Image: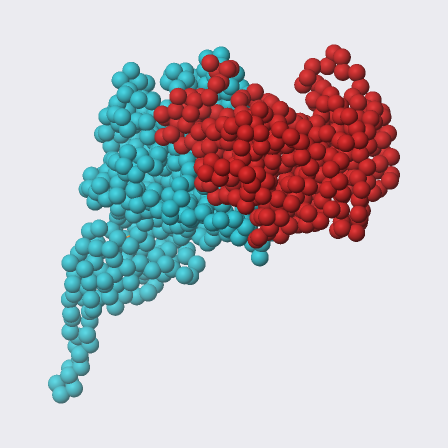
């Protein structure tokens, strides 16, 4: 017997009921195949030998004694670095439905100990705030079919595309067209854009699957989907391929990957869809990109021009420049020039009360091709939890404010606003996106939703999984470890990309038809929106309904 | 649903003729109001000269009329003719109609004013009168102030209004008359919300609903162009878009359809002016209309136009013979206006068509959006 007093506990000693996820293992079903323990990305569970004492009293012999049974069992580890992340891979691989995580409904003490060795908690994913979002609560309530012949979402033709790039006012367009002067480049694209996720953050198979899916959407389905790369460049074979036209290349403060891109320019068969200059990200405003060393594989190191296996933090700002106004102006001009003024260039900023000031600079910059605002609910491959949870601005009111600012200046058609951050957080991707479009966005960027819907990402806003930062993604979506990413078949991802965009297209029509809209995307059609929250209605300048 | 009728004839005719024709279209319609626009006008008791300007509206009180008189006097307009209507107020629903205004003014000396400046002055005068009315509890309503244009708007059954205003006395005749038979019952009734709408010689009336109204309105207001105000009706933007396309962008009339219902990219790829039109579509993206609409327009030179929404969700027919033509939302309307025509030549425009009744009224001109058009500026 062990004496209780001799048990050694540290301040950070935890028991399984202190952890966010508790493993339930049914020994009666378990055949001890060992699949769960080998799949577990964090070694939260282990097979272990146990001995069970069975007291034995032989009355006739007047003898007391014990018998011991030995068995193999599965147990949950309780040390903080090996705490279960609730990913559920163990249940996915178990042939006997014998194991699985359940969320700890009690308060969980692990939260107080995630900062071991003074390292604040870093993770992937997005803001841990479950529940319906403001966007989820917006409904489309101006039903025109009551006064008019109804549109048929199944049979009528719908123009669903949007424009990316600087748009001239009509007078100026006609003047320049007549004079044969430069007209800023624009692209006609599907309004749901695959948001920037870098080649580095994503595994090669995920990236390839997305690209295949995007090409299929464009070339077979006729849905002009584009995807953004995120920081860190693009594989040379893509840069020199005809698929480049579906790709928005991102340049961020670390400039990773841009050597390769610039070198590839002479050999490009076509122009990229656009250039996105990243100034900020909704999930971690004021913080640069971060690719942790776990994920800097040989290929990634080559693409980014860095040694293998080192952390790659990008600075929070573009270092070379003195102020954001100057930076935005000079970078937009430089990038426009690098691509012969044939490619739209736009900045991506994080949602903030100061977004309007950036916007007003862009209005005055004739080369700015749009603005992307990423709200606090945006996802990330790696960030400090405190940034993700508590820093930033929700997208809805930030976007609306910027749009109304443009309306007041009569410039709402000139600078297309794109919105990102939490779109489809609860699965309502089309509804969320269309709500933002009617609030004034020309389109939306979706990242995490795409990972969840096309790659099967397990993460959620209850802290599930969210280990994208350390290269152990159990689905192989955000890992550079071949053993993991070979789990993900690019063809399956591509198939899911096609599924997702086909269904978004159908749902867009199902939303637009009853509103009597089919000729153009209902950008800024705020008269169609209602929300059952008077304060939100007031802030967004839409109807309060109940 | 609105009932629309337009007649354009070489021989001037009475507006009452159109009102009787509208009776033919009464089925399934609420007959809640009347809007009329007359061009090529003549009075039996006044010899009208087209360089004189006609003010149309309603003074709801005597004070409003006096304010109008002094405002017009201060701006140097000299009253030449005040058409006194034979009003039978028992046939008029509204009670606050002090005087229906159809008044001809001589304009002050316009030496040194360009045509644009002169026309802006006329519009500014109309806007000032409208504003004056709005500032006084809506006691003065002004529909138009323009050479050779008369507008009448009233609430009630169209024929009854015609009787109430004595339009059957043949004292006014015109070569072109647009008529619309409904108040905007979708929203609160407001005379300014009644079609046709008018700005600087351009007028349109519509049968339908413009579901893209709010974004279009916001964009037009943002242009800060005087006169782009009102918007009590979602159809008013059709008039302002036509004004914007022809008067501000100086594009030919054929471009109107390309702005309100542009072709698809695949169609523009094979259009001779596809490159220009794609850019125009992008720049004028906020002016793309939506919903079911038949838009009927008339211009200063008595040109009449009919275009449909892109899905042709509303009916509209044009028919007639050399010298007299009609456009109506219902075929029976055409029948009532020009019974002795060759009905096999009646034309129902499809989504790509723009139908024009030219000022010479010899034959219809039909443009297709896939045809090239003259674009002097961009040649
Ligand atoms: S849920 Fe995931 S982390 Fe937890 S034990 Fe199972 S496999 Fe391991
Ligand atoms: S499944 Fe992969 S991508 Fe999704 S949260 Fe887990 S680690 Fe991140």
A201 up-or-down from B223: above or below: below
A488 up-or-down from A19: above or below: above
> Residue A530 placed where, x, y %?
55, 50
User: Which residue is depicted at the point 73% across and 37% down?
Assistant: B170
> Residue A541 placed where, x, y %?
60, 44
Q: Nearer the viewer, residue A338 or A73?
A: A338
Quarter of the image for residue B153 reads top right
User: Which residue is depicted at the point 61% across and 31% down?
Assistant: B9
Colour setting? by chain
A417 up-or-down from A154: above or below: above
Image side of residue B351 versus residue A101, left or right: right
Colour given to chain B in the rendered image: red
User: Which residue is depicted at the point 87% across and 35% down?
Assistant: B66
Image side of residue B148 versus residue A409, left or right: right
Q: Can the viewer see residue B371?
A: yes
User: Which residue is depicted at the point 54% across and 21% down?
Assistant: B251
Image side of residue A111 versus residue A408, left or right: left
Q: Can the viewer see residue A395?
A: no
Q: Which of A306 and A483 is in front in this view?
A: A483
A228 up-or-down from A2: above or below: above
Question: Which chain is represented by cyan in the image?
Answer: A
> Residue A110 placed where, x, y %?
39, 53
């Amino acid at each position: 017997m062990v004496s209780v007093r001799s048990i050694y506990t540290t301040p950070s000693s935890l028991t399984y009921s202190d952890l966010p996820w508790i493993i339930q293992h049914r020994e009666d079903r378990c055949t001890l195949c060992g699949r769960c323990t080998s799949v577990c990305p964090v070694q939260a569970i282990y097979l272990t030998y146990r001995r069970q004492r069975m007291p034995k009293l032989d009355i006739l012999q007047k003898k007391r004694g014990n018998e011991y049974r030995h068995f193999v069992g599965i147990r949950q580890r309780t040390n903080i670095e090996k705490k279960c992340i609730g990913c559920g891979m163990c249940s996915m691989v178990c042939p006997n439905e014998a194991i699985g995580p359940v969320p700890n409904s009690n308060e969980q003490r692990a939260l107080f100990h995630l900062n071991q060795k003074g390292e604040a908690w870093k993770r992937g994913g997005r803001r841990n705030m479950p529940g319906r979002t403001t966007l989820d609560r917006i409904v489309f309530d101006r039903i025109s079919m009551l006064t008019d012949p109804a549109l048929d979402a199944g049979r009528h033709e719908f123009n669903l595309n949007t424009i990316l790039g600087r748009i001239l006012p009509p007078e100026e367009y006609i003047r320049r067209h007549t004079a044969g002067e430069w007209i800023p480049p624009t692209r006609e694209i599907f309004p749901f854009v695959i948001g920037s996720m870098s080649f580095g953050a994503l595994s090669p198979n995920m990236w390839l699957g997305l690209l295949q899916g995007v090409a299929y959407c464009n070339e077979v389905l006729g849905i002009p989907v584009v995807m953004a790369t995120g920081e860190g460049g693009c594989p040379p074979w893509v840069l020199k391929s005809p698929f480049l036209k579906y790709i928005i290349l991102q340049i961020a403060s670390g400039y990773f990957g841009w050597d390769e891109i610039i070198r590839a320019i002479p050999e490009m068969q076509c122009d990229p869809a656009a250039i996105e200059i990243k100034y900020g990200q909704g999930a971690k405003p004021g913080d640069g990109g971060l690719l942790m060393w776990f994920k800097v594989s040989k290929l990634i190191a080559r693409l980014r021009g860095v040694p293998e296996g080192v952390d790659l933090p990008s600075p929070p700002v573009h270092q070379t420049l003195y102020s954001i106004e100057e930076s935005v102006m000079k970078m937009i001009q430089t990038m426009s020039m690098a691509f012969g003024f044939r490619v739209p260039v736009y900045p991506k900023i994080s949602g903030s009360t100061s977004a309007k000031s950036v916007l007003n600079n862009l209005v005055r910059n004739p080369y700015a091709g749009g603005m992307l605002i990423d709200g606090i609910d945006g996802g990330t491959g790696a960030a400090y939890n405190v940034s993700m949870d508590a820093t930033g601005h929700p997208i809805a009111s930030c976007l609306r404010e910027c749009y109304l600012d443009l309306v007041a200046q009569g410039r709402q058609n000139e600078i297309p606003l794109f919105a990102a951050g939490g779109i489809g957080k609860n699965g309502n991707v089309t509804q969320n996106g269309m709500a933002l479009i009617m609030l004034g966005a020309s389109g939306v960027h979706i990242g995490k939703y795409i990972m969840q819907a096309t790659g099967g990402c397990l993460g959620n806003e209850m802290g599930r999984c969210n280990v994208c930062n350390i290269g152990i993604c159990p689905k192989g979506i955000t890992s550079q470890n071949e053993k993991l990413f070979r789990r993900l078949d690019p063809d399956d991802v591509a198939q899911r990309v096609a599924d997702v965009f086909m269904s978004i297209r159908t749902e867009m029509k199902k939303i637009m038809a009853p509103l009597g809209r089919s000729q153009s995307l209902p950008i800024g059609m705020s008269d169609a929106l209602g929300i059952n929250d008077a304060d939100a209605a007031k802030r967004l300048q839409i109807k309060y309904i109940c | 649903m609105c009932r629309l009728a337009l007649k354009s004839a070489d021989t001037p005719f009475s507006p009452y003729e159109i009102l009787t024709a509208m009776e033919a279209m009464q089925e399934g319609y609420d007959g809640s109001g009347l809007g009329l626009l007359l061009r090529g006008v003549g009075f039996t008791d006044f010899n009208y000269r087209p360089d004189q300007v006609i003010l149309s509206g309603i003074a709801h009180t005597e004070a409003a009329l006096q304010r109008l008189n002094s405002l017009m006097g201060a701006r140097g307009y000299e009253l030449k003719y005040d058409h006194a209507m034979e009003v039978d107020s028992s046939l008029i629903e509204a009670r606050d109609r002090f005087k229906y205004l159809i008044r001809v003014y001589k304009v002050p000396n316009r030496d040194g004013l360009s045509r644009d400046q002169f026309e802006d002055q006329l519009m500014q005068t109309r806007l000032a009168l409208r504003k004056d009315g709005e500032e006084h509890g809506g006691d003065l309503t002004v529909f138009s102030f323009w050479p050779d244009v008369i507008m009448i708007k009233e609430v009630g059954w169209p024929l009854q209004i015609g009787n109430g205003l004595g339009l059957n006395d043949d004292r006014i005749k015109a070569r072109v008359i647009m008529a619309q038979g409904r108040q905007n019952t979708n929203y609160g009734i407001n005379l300014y919300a009644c079609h046709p709408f008018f700005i600087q010689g351009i007028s349109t009336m519509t049968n339908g609903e413009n579901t893209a109204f709010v974004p279009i309105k916001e964009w037009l207001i943002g242009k800060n162009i005087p006169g782009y105000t009102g918007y009590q009706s979602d159809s008013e933007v059709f008039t302002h878009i036509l004004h914007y396309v022809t008067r501000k962008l100086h594009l030919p009339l054929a471009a109107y359809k390309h702005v309100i219902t542009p072709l698809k990219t695949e169609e523009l790829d094979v259009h001779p002016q596809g490159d220009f039109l794609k850019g125009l579509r992008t720049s004028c993206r906020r002016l793309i209309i939506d919903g079911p609409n038949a838009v009927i327009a008339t211009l200063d030179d008595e040109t009449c136009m009919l275009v449909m929404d892109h899905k042709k969700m509303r009916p509209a027919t044009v028919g007639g013979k050399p010298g007299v033509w009609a456009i109506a939302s219902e075929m029976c309307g055409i029948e009532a206006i020009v019974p002795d025509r060759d009905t096999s030549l009646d034309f129902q425009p499809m989504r790509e068509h723009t139908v024009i009744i030219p000022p010479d009224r010899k034959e219809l001109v039909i443009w297709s959006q896939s045809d090239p058009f003259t674009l002097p500026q961009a040649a």
